[in-house]
Amino acid sequence: MRIMPPAPPPSTGDGSSGRLARLVSRVVAGVAVAIVALAIAFGLSSCQVAPRAATTVVMASGSDLESANPLVTVHPLSRQVQRHVLLVSLARYDSAMEPEPYLARSWEWSADRTTLTMHLFNGLRWHDGVPTTARDAAFTLDAARDPATGYPRQADLAGLRSAVAEDDSTLVLRFDSAQPRFPTVLCELPLVPEHILAGVERAGMRQAAFGTAPVGNGPFRFVSRTAGSKWVFERDSTFPAVLGGPPHVRRLVVAVVDEATTKFAGLVSGELDVAGIAPTMAALVARDPQLRVLTYPVLFSTGIVFNTHRAPFSDVRVRRAIDLSLRRDRIVMAAFAGLAEPASGPVPPASQFALDTAAVFAPATADSLLDAAGWRRVSEGSPRSRDGLPLRFELLTVGSADNPVEQLIQADLAERGIRMEIRQMEMVGFLAAARRRPKTFDALITGIPGDPSLSYLAAMYASGMAGGALDYGDFHSPALDALLAHAGTARNESERVGAWRDVQRELLRDVPATWVFHSRGVQGLSGRLNGVAMDLRGELATVTAWRVDGDSVGDARVARHP
């Protein structure tokens, strides 16, 4: 881990243009070093690009995949690997985010819409040869709705009374009440193998060997994992045509590359085919004729989660003051070159459920709130303190790079007399600290993977999901529970919209988290890779259609980067 002291405030204007220029200049200056680092990591000489099988694609991940087990995973790319690479779900989203058949080839509702009967394709096998059946589906759903498992979207299954396999290809789901719509969780929860996980205690799912040595049934087979380095998957040549058929790409490697300059260098050198890039680097990537930039919407919002059980964040006035102190427009421009949206709450504005509110920067109001809470300055510009103790806190974050967002927040709060220290951690340690009870951190900044049904809000704040995978802040209240329950049982679309907006209003009053920005996906792609489309379903939604041209990264690259 790395602890970063407070950065000095910007010297001219609002500082955003200077910070942006410094970020870009560091990118350019660091590329050569990053290329050498990649060469060493991949075992290459400094003047040669190693040959690579024509149909092997290497994709960068900013951190190690959390797990291969979808019952315990929140990491966005891990969830995509599960849904689109390793496993299959009962249904899946089409490009318009509407459910369509996948393993379940058809289904029908009872007249009162309390029973859903699904008819599964019966020719799919797990990669160890065991048939995939409706019993695997029933087992997965039963495990997911068991609170002991800790499935992040357990709230979406609260109304499911039973999941029964009537035979190998017939699954019957019975609900406590009429369901107004198809349960979208069935598009997002891949099946897990009953014959492997039935003997694992639900509370021990996170530690099960399956998480790092899985047996799948999807279009790619798991080959190997090197902890903290890479996951390797290989095309399943027997994947049924009715489910899409075998992928074109023979091998998919998910490589852990956390530094922005190293990702950029990997694209330039040809060692990486797909890499999420900092928006500030998009112009640099676009200048390379053998690379291209792909931008797309994502359901991913980043916020600061407060530990409301200890000072200073046990006081809502301090939490609200932090919220009003952030210049989100500057953060979005300086850190993302404008390729993100300032956040006023946890729901992206594109969602039909979002409140029509704008992010507010009100430093004078923030100062008044802090003064009222007893955190005062002895003179203009001095640090705030109360009873001789300074107003300071530690912010946990993931990574080892410059963390421009965190530094910009740090500078904003310094102007209000608040000292914030940035503590960088590896993903595993960060998640352990975020989920540990009782909470011992001050605050943490994290991205929250969303979903169209907003079930992530229940996973974060519903008392019934306390201690779950997204319960980072351990903030719960009877008022929130009632509002979340109403949202989950709304009888029609209009009622759902109103209910979810009431949830957001309550969160705005309590401020258990302050939301900073809503992301937009930005990927750098190798020119040799075709058939790639990315949308709200994620980066890997079309992975089975990806194609590679040529049999190596090419002599042209070697000539340009001797």
Image (spheres, rainbow, N blue to C red):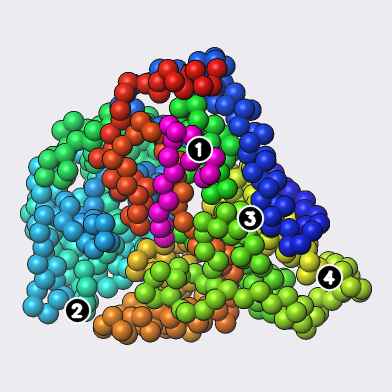
Q: Can residue 290 be seen here?
A: yes
Pointers 1 and 2 in contact (C-beta within 8 Å): no
* Circle on res. 178: 2
Which of pointers 3 and 2 lies earlier in the amino acid sequence?
2
The mark lying in front, picked from 1 and 2, is: 1
Q: Which residue is mark 4?
A: 384
Q: Can residue 204 be seen here?
A: no
* Circle on res. 287: 1
The residues bearing labels 2 and 4 have C-alpha atoms spaced at a distance of: 55 Å
The mark lying in front, picked from 1 and 4, is: 1
- Residue type, mark 2 in image: Ala
In terms of secondary structure, where does tag 1 sit?
loop
Pointers 2 and 4 in contact (C-beta within 8 Å): no
Which of pointers 1 and 4 lies earlier in the amino acid sequence?
1
Q: Position of residue 483 (x, y in %)?
A: 42, 82
Point 54% across, 52% down: residue: 431
Q: Which residue is mark 3?
A: 334
Point 20% across, 55% down: residue: 90
Front residue (pair 86, 404): 404
**Quadrant position of residue 366:** bottom right
- Report the magenta residues as a range: 282-299
Dot 2 crowding, Cα within 10 Å, few <14, some 14–19, many 20+: some
